[in-house]
Amino acid sequence: MEISKPKQLCNQVIQAKMLTTNSYNTNTVTCPFCKRNGHILDKCFKITETPLQDRIKFAQAEKLCFGCLERGHRSKKCDKKSTCEKCQKRHPTCLHNDAFIERNRVIPAVSEKSPDDDEADAEEGDKPSVAISNRVTQATSSTLTSSILPVWVSSKNDPDREVLVYALLDSQSDTSFILDEVAQGLDTNKSKVNLRLSTMSTKSTVIPCDKLVNLQVRGYNDEKRITLPPVYTREFIPVNRSHIPTSETALKWPHLEKLADKLPPLLECEVGLLIGYNCQQALLPRKVLAGKENQPYAQLTDLGWSIVGCSSQSQNHNDVIGTSHRIIVCEVFPVSQPAVELKQQVHFECRTEVKEASPTDVIKALESDFSEHAIDDNPVSQEDILFMSKMTKGIKQKNDGHYELPLPFKTDNPNLPNNKQSAEHRLSSLERRLKRDEKYYKDYFKFMNDIITRGDAEKVPEHELNNKTAWYIPHHGVYHPHKPEKIRVVFDCSAHFQGTSLNDHLLTGPDLTNTLVGVLCRFRKGLVAIMCDVERMFHQFHVIKEHQDYLRFLSWDKGNLNSEPSVYRMKVHLFGAASSPGCCNFGLKHISSQGRNKFSKETVEFIQRGFYVDDGLTSVTSTAKAIQLVKESRELCKTGNLHLHKFVSNNKEVSSVENPADHASMGLNAAQLKESNWLKGPDFLWKKDLPIKKEKLKGQILNSVQVMHTPCIQNK
């Protein structure tokens, strides 16, 4: 499993700015949220109109005490805590959580909570999505918990800057790991290293990552800090959030009820740390609270209490996600040695035999640059398996012939924050450009009106505007450098709001795109070449109704910038969504597989292996086969409402099969071929003034052939 630069999954600190004013009136109070004078934060009406989680994140960003909303100390040491006007408990009214109060009513006789528990109460919220590895999907609910507990992680260089994460105490890992995005927020020493990682799914895989030192960790309600051994960054920690024990877990078992006040509720933070047995102090059990046979047990470590085992007395062990941990890590050092050591070691070797290369060995060496492996050497990840499972179960053909696929979320139907205000801000920037650039304005709304007319987007009905699950996508127009007259509106699915974006929650799936080398090599085999294109491929695959509200956007009706923007939503897979290439490639291959018994083998193979995304290239041995292939491929794609167009061939008879307006050039003879670019088809094979060397030297001939292929790589 190769580690790449991670996606932004964990909680990010919101950089809110504090407005200060100079005044001769020393009694003036400025609210840090609305920036107005005359009231304190707890009495601000603006902040009470925002969701609870937004208030909590604002207080965290401003480093405010959760007891009095002042700076300079924590709630545990606060001696002037506010009294809530709703529940009369010791916390500010604006941080009151009704859900937590209702839950506490069913808790029998618990001890008085510590001040930090109030802070934990306020921090409880919806579960964020997580990326999970080594998982097996089943059809039942989760009933297991593990040694996962909240901790504060910091650097010895800046101990006051702490990040709240969940830590997994893993006794089967000999190394400790940290989420890359958590590490980026810590002031610590980092170095680039390579690790040899062995897990249940891969063996001896070398991955690049960062090595961190001087990190420390403490329990959620403890001050004792534990120094961590060298920690390595990973893109995600393979843990299911439903395995996190809470106070509700303890209340389900009589022998664990007394721990209900010692376990915080589910906090809104990522599982960002995996502590292996190379940090034995963190894993050392100080106390163990056991029950009867086959009942869960609780253990106390220096980082707090955790519950291990079945969380329900129904004894249902068919967990939704089975996470298996067995990690062996070995740091891989460079093979090269210092020059001084090399000079000290001199080896002499005398060979009397030379292995002769057979003709087969020579051919293999020459073809190695153009080989296409049927099986990828890299193992398929668990996320790829989850993606394929969602696509296989979710793809359906609608009455109009189009196929619809779900958005492949990492977790089903994630609850995203309301980012409409952020989308409105981006829309105002777009409005300013539309007003000052008339050509941009006309092209933009021509594109938008086109997708609405075609049915790719629709206006959200009034009765659905307040749907709880919704995400607003900013959009902007871009011009192709070689097509300045044509605009394409791009939907920014990577736009972040409150530390998350739509792309953060989407599975990209395995790479289903055919290799460019394989497509080009097969394209050069036959005498009669054919090229074509799938018209608007991404927009031909629809999104299921349940997921369309994740694709909302704001726009003006009929281009009237003086009117209020209306709410629209896309009904198709978007340019800009991380999952769209995988979904559309899956859909195209699904259509071809459905035509196995109805069309020729050559036609099915062309749709499956002859396309690089939406551009199709192939070649056959005769004109008759080419004509048959063109007709059948169009008919096969029509079964899924895909339109193949822009057919181009070097044979006039094949070109005449299509409507003259639908192809870019007619056939070329040998003389014309020398003066042209051979085929004027899709953009990625197009390059003006292609230099053809007249010299017959081998190097110059190879250079000319290479230039033929170079545009494919440069422009794609």
Image (tube, rainbow, N blue to C red):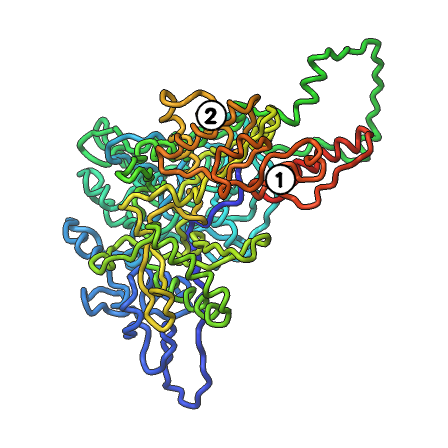
**Residue 117 pos. (x, y %):** 29, 56
Question: Would residue 496 be visible to someone looking at this image?
Answer: yes
Please count the marks in the image: 2
**Residue 67 pos. (x, y %):** 31, 66
The amino acid sitting under disc 1 is Ile
- In the picture, measured across the screen, residue 651 lies left or right of residue 134, that is right
Measure how far apart labels 2 and 1 are at the Cα level.
Answer: 30 Å
Q: Residue at x 37, y 85 (%)?
A: 28
Quadrant of the image occupied by residue 491: bottom left
Query: Label 1, on which residue?
Result: 713
User: Crowding near pointer 2: few (<14 within 10 Å), some, many (20+)?
Assistant: some
Query: Label 2, on which residue?
Result: 628
Looking at the image, the residue that sits furthest to the bottom is 24
Q: Residue at x 37, y 72 (%)?
A: 33
Tag 1's secondary structure?
helix
Say which of marks 2 and 1 sits in front.
Answer: 2
In the foreground, 474 or 410: 474
- In the picture, measured across the screen, residue 215 lies left or right of residue 579, that is right
In the foreground, 199 or 154: 199
Q: Quadrant of the C terminus?
A: top right
Q: Earlier in the sequence, mark 2 or mark 1?
A: 2
Kindly identify which numbered label has been placed on residue 195: none
In the foreground, 70 or 417: 417
Where is 482 relative to 288, above or below?
Answer: below
In the foreground, 499 or 716: 716
